[in-house]
Amino acid sequence: MTPAAKISGFWRVAPFWVSLGLFPLILFAATQGGWWHLLVPLSTWYLFSILDLLGGAQP
Amino acid sequence: MGGLNLDDADPETDDAQLFWYRVVTLIWFPLQFCTIFGLLWYVQNSDHLGTAEKLGLFFAVGILSGTIGITYSHELMHQKSKLERWMGDLLLASVLYSHFRSEHLLVHHRYVGTARDPVTARYNEGFHRFFPRVLRESLLSSFKAEAAMLARKGLAWHDRANPFWRFGALQLGFLALAFVIGGWGGVGLFVFQAFIAVWQLELTNYVEHYGLTRKHLSEGKYEHVRPHHSWNAAHRTSNWLLINLQRHSDHHYKPDRRYPLLQNYSEAEAPQLPFGYPVMTAIAMVPPLWRRMMNPKIRRWRQMYYPEVTDWTPYNKALNLLPK
């Protein structure tokens, strides 16, 4: 169990801020048009899932 | 990076140490608001996007406002501070689904695993049947729950304390803003992203409790909610994205426990999904594949937790007496 004192460390918190990366992706897609619109759904649905699996989360 | 995260934080951790965890949920609404309405303005004033591209862009916005925005609103609505609850309400109004707050707090948490909870997906119920049923039933059940709460205080359903007034005002406000910025086309794109967001939410709701029913004891009385009444996934990176929503059993055990403190349950204590929610929701869109993967798990779950139940028809068909 992670003690209360360690929970607020930067490396503990930072991963939960990763969703903020979707905003620049959407803005980029808006300026580029075309298939770039798929960036957000693909990264939301699959990128994180692929990372889960790469890290060894076997079904 | 990745893999499973089975580590638990001390659940007694003080709120002050969770400050930066809370900030990301609090700043999400202003960012989402600027993105939705900024893009509505942008697509009206730029000529490089065709109709299909505009729809593609607002599909992406709906993924953002549904997968992340509604998940954050869910975290916020469970908290006691007024600011957090307001931010939760604003996020839900921006996807025209404000009543989700009432449905979730007053119906889902109380009646999960019974036929009275619209969003507990029944065994063998495909998502494409579940989705319209939930859209229909959850609006009604959430309104009835608020009206019943007002009645217990001696107030009529139309009293100004009914949050549905606030829900309606906020949603109308956002629709009006979409109209001012983008005319009827703007309203159409705004409603489209809202629909995509709600679709994402209900896919997640579908996965969270598919086929997991509480035992009917007698005369509309049910066993208490237990850890084995939710589907969990300990997958690390998808839990970053969904702020630990996949630690769902603990959320039902302590609904106001902040997301960094949600606890993990082992395979022996609560059912585990083979993949995180994002993959499971994609599979749910293909009902034959979903049934092939999940129905054997449900049958094993029934054998493990309720070997004494021989006839599951009343659970499968929602025929048990509704809880009081």
Image (cartoon, rainbow, N blue to C red):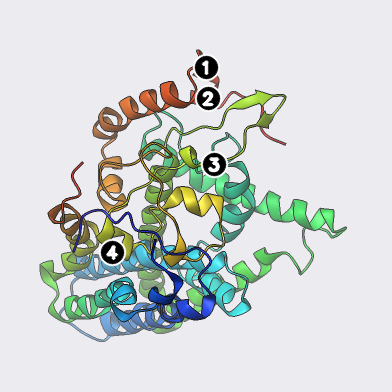
What residue would you read off at disc 2? B315
Give the distance between the C-alpha atoms of the residues marked 1 and 4, in whole angstroms.
44 Å
In the visual, does A35 lie left or right of B115? left
Quadrant where the C terminus of chain B sits is top right
Name the residue beneath numbered marker 4: B59
Q: Nearer the viewer, mark 2 or mark 4?
A: 2
Give the residue pinned by disc 3. Answer: B118
Asked whether the residues under marks 2 and 4 belong to the same chain, the reply is yes
| Mark sitting earlier along the chain (1/3) | 3
- B80, B184: nearer the viewer: B80
Look at the numbered discs 1 and 2 and tell me whether their residues touch, using CB distance below 8 Å: yes
Q: Residue at x 53, y 74 (%)?
A: B14
- Residue located at (17% from left, 67% from top): A39
* Circle nearer the N terminus (1, 4): 4
Q: Are marks 2 and 4 in contact (CB under 8 Å)?
A: no
**Separation (CA) of disc 3 from disc 4:** 26 Å
In the displayed structure, B302 sits above or below B268; it is above
**Marked residue nearer the N-terminal end (3 or 4):** 4
Mark nearest the camera among 2 and 3 is 2
Q: Mark 2 vs mark 4: which is more N-terminal?
A: 4
Q: Quadrant of residue B24?
A: bottom left
Q: CA distance from mark 2 to mark 4?
A: 36 Å
- Crowd tier of the residue under label 3, counting other residues whose Cα lies within 10 Å: few below 14, some 14–19, many 20 or above: many
